Amino acid sequence: METSTDGAVPADAPASSPDTADAGARHATGGRGTGAVAPASLSPSRAGDFMQCPLLYRFRVIDKLPEKPSEAATRGTLVHAVLERLFDSPAGERTAPRAKSLIPGQWERLLAAKPELAGLFADSDEQDAGEKLARWLGEAERLVERWFTLEDPTRLEPAERELFVEAQLDSGLKLRGIIDRVDVAPTGEVRIVDYKTGKAPRPEYAEGALFQMKFYALVVWRLKQVVPRRLQLVYLGSGDVLTYDPVPADLERVERKLHSLWEAIRLATETGDWRPRRTKLCGWCDHRSVCPEFGGTPPPYPLPVLPARASGTGRESGTGGESGGA
Ligand code: SF4
């Protein structure tokens, strides 16, 4: 559940981003007392952030500016938790009513971990607040129900759920992420599955949606020396399933793309040159008040800025201009 466009909270949300979990990068000691460290690894969500807007990446990964929880993102987290926990039950008991019965408990668990989520439904009128929460839980139920029209969990026995993966490429670049589900056939063929609580993209945007899956496939390939047979995106919002069967050349292309992305991130980290990129997605950005595109001023850059390199300086921090497709 790595994608932020899914509406689900990225598994590597900024506060605990795996992109900065390893402080081994060259700026690791230079946080001006703020605790900021240079990014040391890449996840699909953060790669997507950089491609969308380099400044957004900086705000999330380096400044770690807080972001407000949203109803959609929290619903995504809740639905993912329910689908994962359902597989604790014996195969024959993995029914829609059983799955829906897990929703209240998983919501309580999320609330206990993040009490601020209660604020999503706060209202001066207690009855209105209760209705708001009930409506929201009802939407989560509908998403869970729809899953049963797309997959049959009584016939699935996942090899892994919410699997944290990490691989280091020959170049040293570390890739990390969390895969919703991994199925392994008796023949050994691997299928990577990701749930999306949003709607399937239009065909012309499918390549961008598959970027995250190819990223995971590359990590699995590097870890296990097996190219996953199938990548599967399950869109609960629209009731669609998008599949792709990758070949090594696809994953080598993704690897090249990630290297150039990482080089652009490294350069921006060194120079402090993080360009904003205004798009219609800015409407969902929590950081407009500190974004120059909206009249704001970013906080002081918390990492040391190295002198310009002889070559490559002045280059925009925006390999991210490319689409998410790889
Ligand atoms: S408002 Fe838009 S341009 Fe500014 S940081 Fe956010 S995504 Fe980037």
Image: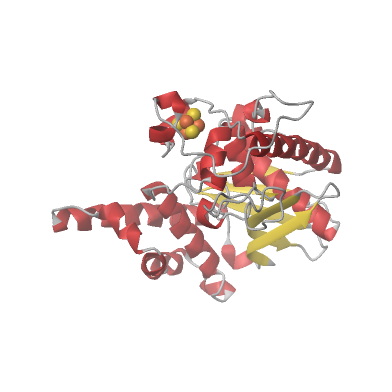
Asked whether 267 or 300 is in front, the reply is 300
Residue 122 x %, y % = 23, 54
Instruction: Report the residue that reaches farthest toward the bottom.
Output: 90
Q: In the rendered view, does 38 fall on the left or right side of 7? A: right
Q: Is residue 134 above or below residue 60?
A: below
Please give the count of numbered marks on the rendered protein: 0
Whether residue 166 is visible, yes or no, is yes
What color scheme is it? secondary structure
Q: In the rendered view, does 60 fall on the left or right side of 114? A: right
Q: Is residue 58 above or below residue 109?
A: above
Which quarter of the figure is the C terminus placed in? top right
Q: Residue at x 58, y 67 (%)?
A: 154
Asked whether 196 or 314 is in front, the reply is 314
Q: In the rendered view, does 16 fall on the left or right side of 268? A: left
Q: Residue at x 39, y 50 (%)?
A: 69
Residue 4 x %, y % = 52, 44
Whether residue 281 is visible, yes or no, is no
Residue 205 x %, y % = 60, 30
Residue 120 x %, y % = 30, 53
Asked whether 220 or 87 is in front, the reply is 220
Residue 89 found in image quarter: bottom right
Residue 284 found in image quarter: top left
Asked whether 113 or 237 is in front, the reply is 113
Q: In the rendered view, does 130 fall on the left or right side of 83? A: left
